[in-house]
Image (tube, helix red, strand yellow):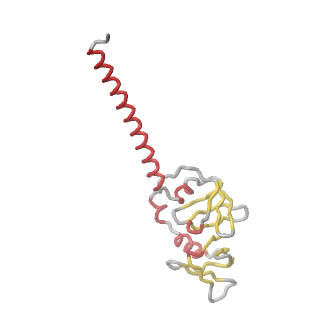
Amino acid sequence: CKSARMRWEELFDDLESQAEATMLELEQEDAAEIEVAEQAQILLADRIRARIGSHLVVGVEGESYAGDVIDASRAWVLLAGPVSDVLVPMSAIAWVDGLERSAPSPQGAELKIGLGHVLRRLAQEEVDVRVLCAGRTVSGVIDRVGYDHLEVRVNGAQIGIVVPFWALTSVAL
């Protein structure tokens, strides 16, 4: 017959084992909840930015662009395409193939370089561009860039074609 002391020790050992198992289960549940919460904070732009130098395929309305990611911000991604580089606004992206799960936090300037900044630089340099918007391609030079739109001058015309940013699908050089 076991002594009373041995029964107490077995009882306490059993209770400690159950408490440890419960604590481990709670820690695992907490870790899973934290992971889900962290994933909910990740932006698509950050996942794309994590792939700079890697190959992606980006789908937009009626088109897809394959190429190595040259650069990206929270507002746009620049792909090195087989014929020309293509600037795609994040708002135009319908799907992406080739992303991994990691996403680094953006650094200072990356947060501030918006689509308008890039388009204004292209306007300053007066480079020929092909702008895809709402199923139409407009080729010319970016003449002006407003807060929420750009104007493309076609064949030296005095008045250009105005494209709101929300309708912009891509800009190729």
Quarter the N terminus occupies: top left
Q: Name the outermost residue toward the bottom.
A: 158
Residue most extreme to the right: 83
The residue nearer to you, when weighing 121 against 66, is 66
Q: Which residue is at a point 47% across and 54% down the rendered structure image?
A: 105
Q: Residue furthest front?
A: 1
Give the image location of residue 172, x and y in percent.
Answer: 66, 69
Q: Nearer the viewer, residue 56 or 120?
A: 56
Residue at horizontal 45 percent and vertical 45 percent from the top = 32
Looking at this view, is 98 or 157 the one in front?
A: 98
Side of 15 relative to 137 (left or right):
left
Vertical placement of 167 versus 28: above or below?
A: below
Residue 170 lies, in percent from the top left, at: 63, 70
Q: Is residue 145 above or below residue 93?
A: below
The residue drawn where x is 67% and y is 85% is 156
Q: Quadrant of residue 18?
A: top left
Q: Is residue 44 above or below residue 91?
A: above
**Where's residue 5, x and y in %?**
26, 15
Is residue 173 shown to the viewer in this render? no
Quadrant holding the C terminus: bottom right
